[in-house]
Amino acid sequence: MEPEILGLLLAVALAAGWIDAVVGGGGLLLLPALLVGAPNAPLATLLGTNKLASVFGTTSAAVAYARKVRVDPRLVVPTALLALVGSGLGAGLATALTSEVLQPIIMVVLAGVALMVYFRPTMGAATDPGLRTRNRVLATIALAGLGVSFYDGLIGPGTGVFLIIALTAVLGLDFLTASASAKIVNACTNLGALVVFAVGGHVDWLLGLTLAVCTIVGAQLGARTALKRGSGFVRAVLLVVVLALLMRMGWDLFA
């Protein structure tokens, strides 16, 4: 790989780590950059390499959040354990299914997310304990632990966004607590998918670990920014990332 291409990938990995730590969606930057930087590499290898870099960034962000934000282990632990399974199943099908089938559905969901966040400014502003019923908790564990994690293993970009929306819209968590909880689950989704890709020999370990250094730095900066700026800042970044995801998927689908 040419030095200038590697330098660009390292810069993108730094930015991806920052975005991933704040709200998720770092794959929106890093995966396309890998596709451009290594056009002759197999898609599965690029997906696996992206997961290797991402798992370090999300884990680093999760540790940074855990020091400042209190998360509920009764919610996070079972969701994270299910996420290992769900993302592994998604990664197992990543080379057999095409994402084009799912993209129109995902775009509709993302559009709904953008409208929900925009027109409900109070959502995620503060925790609403009244929404945390037993059935809602179980539904969130199933939705985030299996549904969203399966999507992460199969396609990837935007997983953190979907996790945060599930935690805020269904359980009434504030955006900052939801982001902290989502990082733990997202680290497990990345790990589950990475194991499957690694077993299949679809990981460039040298490149992935090099990019991981930058995702860790970006994740630490992003987590500190989110903790300092609060839920309002996370909400604003969330809207930007959702709109960027919509444009990216629209381009892939119609270009």
Image (cartoon, helix red, strand yellow):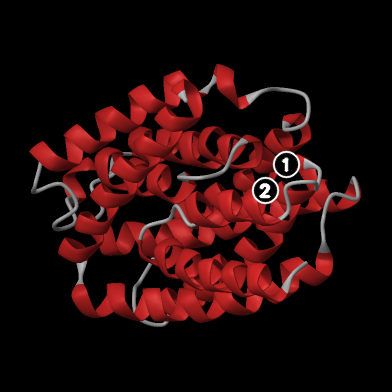
Q: Amino acid at mark 1?
A: Gly
> Residue 165 falls in which quadrant of the image?
top left
**Residue at position x 35%, y 41% in the image:** 166
In the rendered view, would you say 213 is above or below 142?
below
Q: Give coordinates of residue 213: x percent, y percent.
A: 63, 79
- Can residue 168 be seen in the rendering of this structure? yes
Q: Label 1: how many residues lie within 10 Å, few (<14), some (14-19) or many (20+)?
A: many
Which label is found at residue 84? 2
- Could you say which disc has been placed on residue 198 in the image? none
| Residue pictured at 72% horizontal, 34% vertical | 89
Q: Position of residue 193 (x, y in %)?
A: 71, 47
Under tag 2, what secondary structure? helix
- Given the image, on which type of amino acid does mark 2 rest? Leu
Graded by Cα atoms within 10 Å as few (under 14), some (14 to 19) or many (20 or more), the crowding at tag 2 reads: many
Q: Are marks 2 and 1 in contact (CB under 8 Å)?
A: yes
In-image side of 133 versus 253 (left or right): left
In percent of width and height, residue 123 lies at 15, 46
Q: Quadrant of the N terminus?
A: bottom right
| Closer-to-camera residue (232/143) | 232
Can you tell which mark lies on residue 88? 1
Dot in front, 2 or 1: 1
